Image (spheres, rainbow, N blue to C red):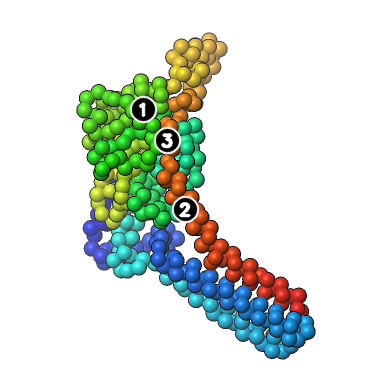
Amino acid sequence: MELRWLTAPEHGVAAAMADERRSGRSKWVPTGRRVLFHLYFSLVLWYLAIALVSVGVSVDEYHDGRVEIDDVVGLVVAVLVLVGLLVGAWFLYRWSRRPPSPKARLAEWRTHLTAVANGFEEEPEGRAMFSSLITTTGKYNNAFITTPGPQLSSHPRFVGDRVEFGNLVDDVKRSRDWHYLTVKLPAPLPHLLLDATTNDTVRSDLPPGLDRGLRISLEGDFDRWFRVYAPSGYGTDARYVLTPDVMSSLVSTAAYYNVEMVDDRVVFFSKPAADFSYAAPWVAVDAILSDLVPRLITRAERYRDERVAGQDAESVLEAARDAMEAEQVWTRKETVVGEEGRRLTVRARFHAIWVAVGAVSWLVTRTLLYFIPGAFAFAGLMSVIDGR
């Protein structure tokens, strides 16, 4: 990793950012300022509603449906005031998208330049962009129910070739913030979950609901570092993936991360959210990508779930033999994992409750801030049109 921008002089960082395309710069993800902007815009809608209703009542009730000169003047004044308020909303929006202090702006610039120097794009999102235990709600022993609530966002979020890392931030319950790294593998693996012991407090930091009966034991002292869970009957497959060199790399590069292998993706995650204006999270990502991930890619390329018809060694050899006899080019079929091995049994009950609370609060807030004043504004507009 190229990390010189994290410690470069401030004037050098500012000069480098001046050369960056504005369209390519990362956008600050606001918190309190965003709330202020929403409140202001809601007041603008309320003003519009009151102004239009007042003009409509004046036309209908006081002038018997006739538009008088004072109605026109009142409407023109209301429109001019509205334009001024909308201009103010635009400036407030731009202000809300800026870092709250020069120190925060400098940290953002350092992070952005470091990402660019290492070939990553900074692309924050208002939702999680991958399926995992930390982004999924409800029961998923056969398929994910991926419904991350609107309170879950991914920022900062750095994206590269088959790689994504950053922070997952839960605006409702900040104790559920994570920093993560996810890599797309060339082929799927059974659903394996490695619960790191080094990041535990009183208990495991994983969401509750994991079937503890699915835990398996591996050789050596690996159990001291990770609790390993595999689908029922897939213990041998887990040992095929977690070879001694993979386990050694896990301990040396990812001991503080929980690890989840699901479908064709591996996810490393740990609490709390990381500060990417410092070197430590970048160094951790670099160690995992350079040492551990290549080993996992090799295991994924070689793994075959022989429970699936046509993937056992005998069937593969027979297919290859038939292709040779027919003088055809033989290509291996796309690998799949059997249904029983695709998902561990996990019911993330408490996380689902918080997601439901967040979804309800989001809906109520938007209704109060936008839908109700918007409905009154529309009713006022229709009354003005009907009066004319």
Answer yes or no: is residue 279 visible. Answer: yes
Of residue 314 and residue 207, the one placed in the foreground of this image is: 207
Marked residue nearer the N-terminal end (3 or 1): 1
Residue 291 coordinates in the image, percent (x, y): 28, 35
Answer yes or no: is residue 287 visible. Answer: no
Q: Residues within 10 Å of mark 1 (few under 14, many from 20)?
A: few
Task: Tell me the distance, in whole angstroms, between the alpha carbons under discs 2 and 1.
Answer: 30 Å
- Residue 345, labelled with which disc? none
Residue 316 coordinates in the image, percent (x, y): 47, 15
Please state if 374 lies on the left or on the right of 260 as rendered: right
- Which picture quadrant has residue 60? bottom right
Q: Residues within 10 Å of mark 3 (few under 14, many from 20)?
A: many
Instruction: Give the residue at x 49% y 13%.
Output: 315
Name the element at disc 1. helix
Look at label 3 and name its amino acid.
Val
Please state if 325 lies on the left or on the right of 215 as rendered: right
Where does the C terminus fall, quadrant-wise?
bottom right
- Which picture quadrant has residue 46? bottom right
Q: Is residue 323 above or below residue 46?
A: above
Look at label 2 and name its amino acid.
Val
**Extreme-left residue of the structure:** 221
Task: Tell me the distance, in whole angstroms, between the alpha carbons under discs 3 and 1.
Answer: 11 Å
Q: Are marks 3 and 1 in contact (CB under 8 Å)?
A: no
- Residue 346, labelled with which disc? 3
Please state if 377 lies on the left or on the right of 235 as rendered: right
Look at label 1 and name its amino acid.
Gly
Marked residue nearer the N-terminal end (2 or 1): 1
Name the element at disc 2. helix
Residue labelled with disc 2: 357
- Residue 213, labelled with which disc? 1
Q: Is residue 138 above or below residue 355?
A: above
